[in-house]
Every structure is written in C-alpha cells, then in structure tokens.
Amino acid sequence: MLGEKIAAFGGLPTVEPAPIKQALALEEMLQQDLELERAAVAAYYEVMRAAKEDVSLRHMMEGLIETETTSVEEIEKLLSLNTVKTEEREIRLKKMA
C-alpha cells in the first residue's frame, strides 16, 4: 500500500530491507521488535502530519497507526514481568491488564 502511494506521488519506493538484528533470548527479541514497532508508529505519525489535505493518505496512516499501536501494546504486555525480592527468594509477578 505504501509503495503504491509513494509511486502515486511520483516517488520510488525503496526495495532494500533494513538490517536485521538477531537475538537468542526471547526477551531480547521482544525488545527489538518493540523498538521497531515504536519506530514504525512514529514514522506513520510523521507521514500523517505531512499528509495534511490528502484524506486517502491520512486514512491509510490512521489504519497503520492503529495496527502498529496494537502490536506495541501486546509486546509491552508480554514484557511486563516484574521481580519482587523478599529475604528468602525472588518472586516474579506478571502485570494483569
């Protein structure tokens, strides 16, 4: 969708993928994904601000922002483990939404 819109504005969409970070630990993978999702949301907001009168582009960005924001919230929930230390042991608590 974005490539088509870029072409409609006379631009040339990029075909080069971004570098991929690799991780072995699940939490690190989720942190990396969270960073990417937050960056996508910020980029879509930037495009939406620039769209001004282009209702079609604004609508597209709103949909993408909604989708990415939902992803950010889901990853944040997955990462919401807290640790409480007592004298005897550590207890891991998961935040409930």
Image: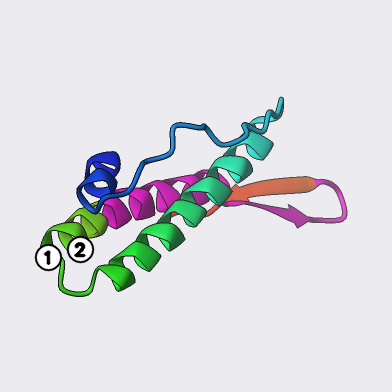
* Location of residue 27 with respect to 50 vertically, above or below: above
Taking 24 as reference, is 52 left or right? left
Q: Amino acid at mark 1?
A: Val
Q: Can residue 22 be found in the magenta stretch?
A: no
Q: Position of residue 26 (x, y in %)?
A: 64, 31
Closer-to-camera residue (11/94): 11
Taking 50 as reference, is 89 left or right? right
**Label of residue 58 in the image:** 2
Q: Amino acid at mark 2?
A: Arg
State the residue lying farthest toward the right. Answer: 87
Q: Which residues are magenta?
A: 64-89
Closer-to-camera residue (90/50): 50
Residue beneath disc 1? 55
State the residue lying farthest toward the left. Answer: 55
Q: Quadrant of the C terminus?
A: bottom left
- Identify the secondary structure beneath mark 2: helix
* Location of residue 49 with respect to 71 vertically, above or below: below
State the residue lying farthest toward the top. Answer: 24
**Are the residues at dot 1 and dot 2 in contact (C-beta closer than 8 Å)?**
yes
Q: Based on the displayed image, in which of its 4 quarters is residue 96 positioned?
A: bottom left
Closer-to-camera residue (62/7): 7
Figure label count: 2
Closer-to-camera residue (51/72): 51
